[in-house]
Amino acid sequence: MKHCLLKPLSLDAWDDRYRELVSSGLIEPFYGGPLSRHVTASGDHRLERLRFDSSPAALRLWNFLLTENERLRKARAAGDRLVGAMKDLGTVPVMAYALEGLRAFYPDGTWWTPCLMEETDCLLPKAEALGIDASFCPVRAMLAAFQDGGHFPRPDFLVCSAGAVCDDFSAIAQRLEKLGFPVLWWEMPRRRAPEPGEAQVVLPGGMVTARELVDCVREELARVGEALAELAGQTPSDAIWNKAVRAANQVRGLLAELRRTVYHAPVAPVPALEMLIAEMLAIHYCSDREETVAVLTDLLDEARRRLSTRIGVVAENAVRVFWVNPVADLRAMNLLEEWGGCLCGSDFMFTHALDPIPEDMPPLEALARTALADPMVGPAADRAARVVREARAAKAEAVVVARIPGASHSATEGRVILEAVRHALGLPGVEVEIAPVCDAMQPTLAGRLQALLETARARRVKKP
Amino acid sequence: MIFAGIDAGSRSIKVVLYDAETRKVVGRGIAEQGVDQAQLAEALFEQTLEVSGFGRNQVARTVATGYGRGSVRFADSTVTEITCHARGVWQTSPDARTIIEIGGQDSKVIWIEPDGRVRDFAMNDRCAAGTGRFLEMVATRLGVDLRELSVISWASARPAVISSTCVVFAETEIIGLLASGAAVPDIAAGVQKAIASRVSAMAMRSVVPPVYFTGGVALQPGMCRALQEALETEVQVVQDPQFTGALGAALVAAAQ
């Protein structure tokens, strides 16, 4: 029996769909409403170019994502203290949400704002005026957002890792500090294999590193934890952090189930774009962990419902693509499907927030191990090995490595990943650079992605 | 039954008419690319049909490829250059295992299976330094015709070193070389060497012989020599390399 193909909706079409849903009794959370209001109210014009999943679950996901600013301001007004977690490596929001009265968010996420708002808010030119030009990652938009105060309230406390993380980000955060935003820095050493005879530790995901690195990160996290607890007026304890780990794992478990359901399905039941947004929630919960659980549960229910009723969002013969790195223009995820591909797996650089945090050891030790398992803090070969493993499990037919213009951590690792994929799996792969607004590059992007999909499809035919 | 392939490239448009019964190319045409890409492709198609003695109703199917393939509105379908170049080269050189295509805007390395299917490919995507655009810029700067550039390079005894990976900066280097009295043949050969070196890097040391060279830049014999040196293997230029993509598109049309 064939699958029923569900087409994505434009923003205008979503308005009609919204009216239908409301008249048929749609119950929405407090941040609900038609998607087009984000264009009229906030100027997120890039949304007009996107195509959205038509489910109420997707509506909730998008509304949740696009109302973070309002949520943070309400939290501030209600007396919550706001923690800006930068380059958190899956740890700081986990800790912050265990403390009553703290709410963590992810100012780095602002790098997507210019992607959604095109030029309307001029964050990138403003960042350039503040000394961080286009040779840096679009995350530089954050700098201007701190200055203009329009995209999120000024945090009460800023935490940022430094060391074996993104060089661009470190430079931008240092500039931020110079502009008068104090930052609590914590050190992230580069992950390395243990020397012969050196004490070792197995990290989530199976990598092995030196004991001394885990000890170093654990001590750094303890320092961060003390600062957070002081901000919340509480005394840090393992009991608090254990609670934090369990709560984080609830989100991670849900997301893992969603990924398994969607990526392993014969025909994808949720589009690539919504999967990217859903995975992003794991990093910082979009400023509300409990609501994240509700949003992901809805999406998972929808995915299961579609699977059981044979509803898919791509053609049955769509090419299964494993996608590496997030895109600076979300439109690229739509284009993958419009051109005949489907997402069968991903490493959006959020993997540090996807793996379950070990619960069978002291919580700070577990968080330190989780942070050290982040692909960004070790050699590109480690990340390539993970991509190979996951692409194989996902039965991928092709691999795409997206590059973010100016991002130092992805400047050369794409090649390492693709070579590993070719060598280990014999799959075709392509590296594509996706700018914050990729319209002008669309013919070039089409040349690469469509050629990849054609190549993968041609390989399906059995050799004579 | 006639099938048409149209390669709407960044620098020129090519049309090939293919007779599937006689398995022969029965017509072809080429024109400079311009602003109104759709109109130019249509005009070239009509002209090629007329010169070849065919009417539009005799064309069973048309496939467009190339950077501007989306603008060829009368095409029945579009296929990428990777597939079309592979198909076109395999038609005339079935022993090909690696294809290098250097066009006006990008360059590609295509690995193909013995049955002609594409196994994998790599494309440059950062700038024009590995493309025909680089040669055009240099020819303009040196005040010679593009075709002359290749002939001039044969006289080089010591190719100049062009280290920039960006055409704009490379132009600055060339101005510097000219100012320091470097010989024009050495600059021409140096540019070819720089392009070949970028293609070689793109091939990631995975070139499988026999290697065939196609695309408009393959018309420059000096480029083939530079590629051979960079890849350390023999490189053969396919017949009528500028038409390979359009031929491949016509063959794909015939197979659809």
Image (cartoon, coloured by chain):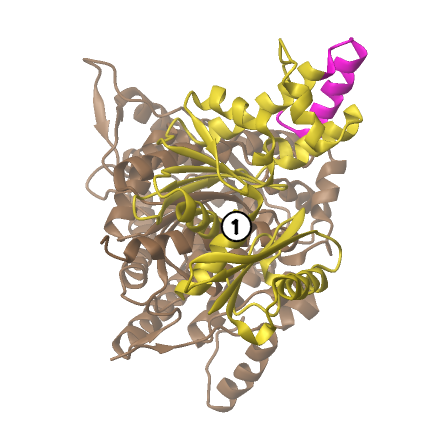
Chain colours: A brown, B yellow
Q: Residue at x 71, y 40 (%)?
A: A127
Q: Main secondary structure of the magenta part?
A: helix
Image-quadrant location for residue A10: bottom right
On screen, residue A256 versus residue A102, left or right, reads left
Instruction: Write the residue at 47% across / 23% down.
Output: B228
Q: In front here: A6 or A120?
A: A6
Residue placed furthest toward the bottom: A23
- Residue A368 in view here: no
Taking the image as shown, residue A131 lies to the left or right of residue B189, namely right
User: Nearest the camera: A82 or A160?
Assistant: A160
Vertical relation: A265 (above or below) B162: below
Q: Which residue is mark 1?
A: B245
Nearest the eye: B73 or A256: B73
Where residue B233 sits in the image (x, y, percent)?
A: 41, 23
Q: Chain of mark 1?
A: B
Q: Which residues are magenta?
A: B165-184
Quadrant assignment, res B16: bottom right
Q: Residues within 10 Å of mark 1 (few under 14, many from 20)?
A: many
Residue A141: x and y in percent read 65, 44
**From the viewer's perspective, is A146 left or right of B62?**
right
Q: Residue type at mark 1?
A: Gly
* Quarter of the figure that contains the N terminus of chain A: bottom left
Residue A108 picture location, percent across and down = 55, 44
Residue B95 part of the magenta-drawn span = no
The quadrant the C terminus of chain A occupies is bottom left
